[in-house]
Image: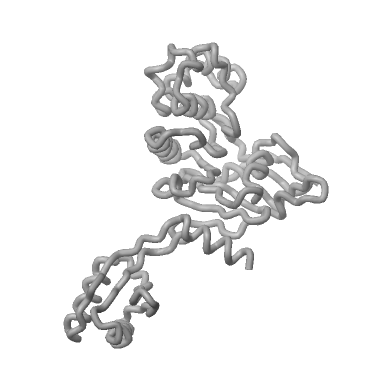
Amino acid sequence: MYYLSVVDNEAPVVLTNVTKKFGSTTAVESVSWAPRLGQVTALVGLNGAGKSTLMRVITGLIKPTQGEVSVADTANGRALSAMIEAPALYSGLSVQRNLLIHCTLTGAGPGDIPRVAELAQIENVLAKRVGTLSQGYRQRVAIAIALLGSPRTLLLDEPTNALDPQAIVQLRGLIRRVADEGTAVVVSSHQLRELEGTADALTLLHEGQIRYDGPFASFVGPPSLRVRVVDKHAGHTLLELLKAGGIHGELDSEGIQVTQDTGDTDKTAYRVFATAADAGIGLVELSHITPTLEEAFRLAIAGAQS
C-alpha cells in the first residue's frame, strides 16, 4: 500500500520503506530516507541504481509499489519543488513571462520574481526570450522557477548536463546559496567531481538500496600523508618509530601512507619529519594526499558488489 501524508516534521520530506517495481524489476527497494534542511545532499549511484526513480517518487510523478512519503506541513511556501529532465520553459516567451506563468501554476505571487531572479542571477535577462539564452542561463531560469514559492526541498536531477565549465561553477555557487538560506537541496549527478566542495551530505544508492547516508566528509575519508624514504629498508624502522609515537600508517610499494586522522595533517607532517630527522632517516617525499569522491565511490561500489 502507498501512502502520501502531510505531517508536522522538522524534515521536509520523509520516505519510509519505499519500494518501486516495474514488472519483475525492482528499481527502489525498502528505502527509508530524508533530506536535510540547509544542506546540499549528493545523491549518487551507478546508472540504473534508482536515483531518478527515487526523485520521481518523492515528487509524486510516479507512485511507489509500497511505502510512505511524508511531506512536512508548511504554513508558508511550497513543501518541495524539482527540476527533473528538460526544464519546462517556453522558448518563445521572455524569462519574465515564463516566471509569471509558473507563478500561476505554482500558486506563488508575482512579487516572488525579484527574489528568485536575484538568487539565480538572471536579473539581466528577464526581458530576453528564453530561446536566445545559453544553456547555462536556461538552467538558471529553470532553477529560478523551481524556487518560486520558497520550497523547503529542491530536487535537481543531473543539473550540470550540457553545461560548460564556467556555467557549472556558477551553478554550484547557486546551489550553495539556496542551501545556505535553509532549503534542503538534493542533487543527483553522474559528474562526481562537480559535487566536491558543494555537498554537505551524501546518499549512495546501489541496486535500489541505500548503502550510505551521512556526512560527505565521512564518506570520502580524511586526508592522509605519503612518506617515501631514501633507503627503502629504513621504511620499516620509520614506520615502527611513528607507531611508537602514536602515528599510524601502512607500508606499501610506494612507501608509508599515514592514515591517522588527527584533524591537522600539517602538524602530523611536522611530527613525521621530526621523527625521521631524529633517527637520521632521509626523506624523498612527504606529501598530502586528499581523497576524492570518485575514489571513495569506486571503493564503495566494489564493496557493495563483493
| In the foreground, 81 or 289 | 289
Q: Position of residue 268 (x, y in %)?
A: 27, 71
Q: Residue at x 55, y 21 (%)?
A: 108
Q: Residue at x 66, y 48 (%)?
A: 48
Q: Is residue 174 above or below residue 223?
A: above
Q: Is residue 21 above or below residue 75?
A: below
Q: Position of residue 109 (x, y in %)?
A: 53, 18
| Res 47 seen here | yes
Quarter of the figure with residue 261: bottom left
| In the foreground, 124 or 92 | 92
Image quadrant occupied by the C terminus:
bottom right
Q: Is residue 147 above or below residue 129?
A: below
Report the coloring of the rendering: one colour
Relative side of 157 to 31, left or right? left
Q: Residue at x 48, y 24 (%)?
A: 138
Q: Position of residue 298 (x, y in %)?
A: 52, 60
Q: Is residue 85 above or below residue 14?
A: above
- Looking at the rendered structure, the number of numbered marks drawn on it comes to 0
Quarter of the figure with residue 158: top right
Q: Position of residue 148 (x, y in %)?
A: 52, 25
Q: Residue at x 51, y 36 (%)?
A: 161
Relative side of 88 to 260, left or right? right
| Res 7 seen here | no
